[in-house]
């Protein structure tokens, strides 16, 4: 179930085209209107750019040469102890099989290993599956919206936090 690839800024720059092809295949088979290859590529270009000096990582779960789930984190405003979970995707065909939970647990552990004190995430209030998944892994509802916890993030998402 686990074949994780952690992608850093240097790795992304070196192998960008390969990663974009893999992600494009994921989005071709993804059932969400929330994101697409172009939007996600723009996000990756931003977080992995030389202008954005915060630490960041993309983690892919690859099976048989295809991305079946991925998660993305970034350090918030160069604060070593504060990180944001930007996105978690899993193929619909792999949901309710533990892939999302294992990916989230693995990603949280990677952030924790970077000496983070707090990890924040935003979830749309009607996304019950994502809320349950985050809570199962240890996130708590902060009682605030995501943009109140991290300036510049979407206003319509509830802020969830996990403290280390």
Image (cartoon, grey):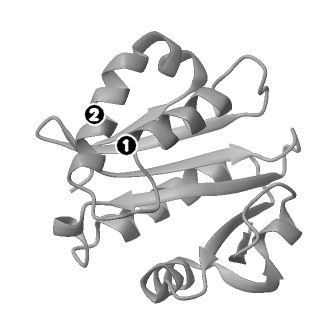
Residue 118, located in which quarter of the rendered image? bottom right
Residue at the disc numbered 2: 22
Q: Position of residue 18 (x, y in %)?
A: 31, 21
Q: Is residue 114 in view from this perspective?
A: no
Above or below residue 62? Residue 163 is below
Disc 1 target residue: 60
User: What is the x, y in percent for residue 154?
Assistant: 72, 64
- Mark 1 in CB contact with mark 2 (< 8 angstroms): yes
Circle 1 SS class: strand
Looking at the image, which residue is at 55% across and 27% down?
8
- Using residue 11 as the reference point, say whether residue 64 is left or right of it: left
Quarter holding residue 69: bottom left
Disc 1/disc 2 C-alpha distance (Å): 9 Å
Q: Position of residue 35 (x, y in %)?
A: 45, 54
Q: Is residue 121 visible?
A: yes
Q: Residue furthest top?
A: 14
Is the C terminus in the top left, top right, bottom left or bottom right quadrant?
bottom right
Asked where in the image residue 99 lies, by quadrant, the reply is bottom left
User: Picture coordinates of residue 14 (x, y %)?
Assistant: 46, 10
> Which residue sits at x=56%, y=33%?
42
**Numbered disc 2: secondary structure:** helix
């Amino acid at each position: 179930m686990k074949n994780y690839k952690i992608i850093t800024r240097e790795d992304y720059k070196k192998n960008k085209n390969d990663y974009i092809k893999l992600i494009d295949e994921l989005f071709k088979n993804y059932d969400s209107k929330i994101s697409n290859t172009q939007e996600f590529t723009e996000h990756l270009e931003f977080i992995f750019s030389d202008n954005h000096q915060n630490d960041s990582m993309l983690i892919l779960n690859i099976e048989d040469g295809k991305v079946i789930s991925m998660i993305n984190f970034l350090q918030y405003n160069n604060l070593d102890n504060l990180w944001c979970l930007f996105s978690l995707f899993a193929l619909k065909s792999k949901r309710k099989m533990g892939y999302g939970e294992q990916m989230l647990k693995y990603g949280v552990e990677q952030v924790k290993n970077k000496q983070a004190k707090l990890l924040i995430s935003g979830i749309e209030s009607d996304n019950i599956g994502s809320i349950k998944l985050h809570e199962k892994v240890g996130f708590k509802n902060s009682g605030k919206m995501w943009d109140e916890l991290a300036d510049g993030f979407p206003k319509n998402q509830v802020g969830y936090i996990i403290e280390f």
